[in-house]
Image: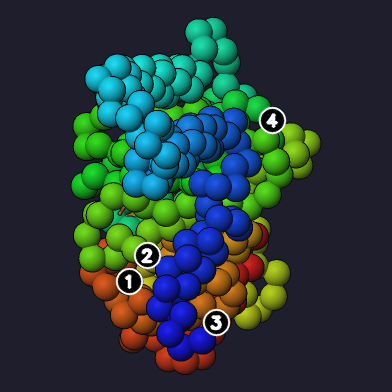
Amino acid sequence: MSARLPTLLPVVLVLTGCTGMQSAMNPAGEEAEQVSWLLWGMTGFLGLVFVFVLVATGVALMGSERLRLRMARDSFILGLGLVFPAVALTVIFFFGLSVQAERAWPDGRVPALTATITGEQWWWRVVYEGPDGARIASANELRIPVGESVRLNLETADVIHSFWVPNLAGKLDMIPGRTNVMTLTATKPGTYRGQCAEYCGGAHALMSFHVVALPPDDFAAWQAAEAGPAVMPVTPELERGAQIFAEIGCGACHTVRGTGADGTIGPDLTHVGSRLSLAAATLPNNAEAFARWIRDNQHIKPENKMPAYDILSEQELTLLAHYLESLE
Ligand code: CUA
C-alpha cells in the first residue's frame, strides 16, 4: 500500500477531475462537446499509433528473422517513418480545424440572451441585456436558459483575466481594451463552476463563479425577478440593518436598486441573497459569511478593493449581515 500510494495518487487526482461541476470531461454544452470530441478523437487516434509503435518495437526486437528483414527495408522506413506521420498529422490538423469551425458564430443566428461579463480584481461583473433592452446588473454568477444560444461579451476593467467554465466551453481571455465574444449553448440544466484561468494578481485563485443553466420557463421567471428592485426590509431588525448599510456608506461602492445605494465600484447587491455564493464563489451565501466578509475580507481575499469594516460592533455586524442575506 505505502509503496503504491505515490504512483496511484496522481492517477486518483487526475480522475477526480473527470466528473462534477467543473470538468471539461463532463460536457453539458455544445461548445464543450466539441472540445471533448477533439480530446477523445485525438487521444483515440494517437493511442492507436502508440500501440502500433509498441508492437513494431516488439517485432523488431523479438520477431522472426523474416519479419525483421522486412522491417529493415527502405520502403518500410520511408512509409511508416515519413509518409505515415505526414498523412496522420495532416488528418489530425484538419480534424481540429473542422471542430473549431463549428464553434464559429453562424451568420444571422440571434442569441436568446446577451450578457456582458467584466473581469475585475477579483470578481466578475455581470450585466444582462433584458428583453426590453434594460440592463440588469449582477455579479459572480450567470444564469442562462438551457438549449438556447447565449452571447457573452467578455471584457476587463483592469488586467487580463480568462473566462472558463469547463463544462460549457473552452476558455477565452478578457483583454484590456477589447471585447471578446463567446457563445454558449447549455445542453443540460445544472450548476457549473467556472474559474479565472489567467493569473491576474494575488487572489487569482479566489476568482471563481457559477453558471446556472435553467429550463427556459424557469429562466424567464428568474430574469423577471432579477430585473426588479430589492425587497424592502420587513422587520425592525432588517430595517436597522438597512440603516447601518446606508450609514457606513456601503452605497458609495454598491448598488441596491430601489434604495439610495447606487455605487458601481463593487458588485451589485440588489439580489445578492439569492446567489449561490459570496465573494466570487469563495464563501457560502449566509449571514455568517456576510459578517465574516465585511469584517475580515482583507484576510479572506487580500488586497481586494473593499476596506475591512472592523469598526462595527458584533451586534451591528449581525444586523447588517442579516439585511444583506434578506436581499433575495
Ligand atoms: Cu482573474 Cu485570474
- Distance CA(mark 4)–CA(mark 1): 36 Å
Residue wearing tag 3: 288
Residue 305 picture quarter: bottom left
Foreground mark, 3 or 4, reads 4
- Type of amino acid under label 2: Leu
Is the Cβ of the residue at disc 2 closer than 8 Å to that at disc 1? yes
- Distance CA(mark 3)–CA(mark 4): 36 Å
Does 58 appear above or below 129? below
Among numbered discs 2 and 4, the one appearing first in the sequence: 4
Residue wearing tag 4: 147
Does 102 appear above or below 135? above
Residue wearing tag 1: 301
Asked if one can make out residue 26 in the rendered structure from this viewpoint, the answer is yes
Indicate the position of residue 196 as horizontal and vertical percent values. Answer: 37, 52
Q: Alpha-carbon neighbours of circle 4 within 10 Å: few (<14), some, or many (≥20)?
A: some
In this rendering, would 166 be left or right of 264? right
Secondary structure beneath dot 4 equals loop
Quarter containing the C terminus? bottom right
Is the Cβ of the residue at disc 4 closer than 8 Å to that at disc 1? no
Is the Cβ of the residue at disc 2 closer than 8 Å to that at disc 4? no
Q: Alpha-carbon neighbours of circle 2 within 10 Å: few (<14), some, or many (≥20)?
A: some
Q: Compare residues 92 and 175 and report the one nearer the observer.
A: 92
Q: Compare residues 35 and 106 and report the one nearer the observer.
A: 35
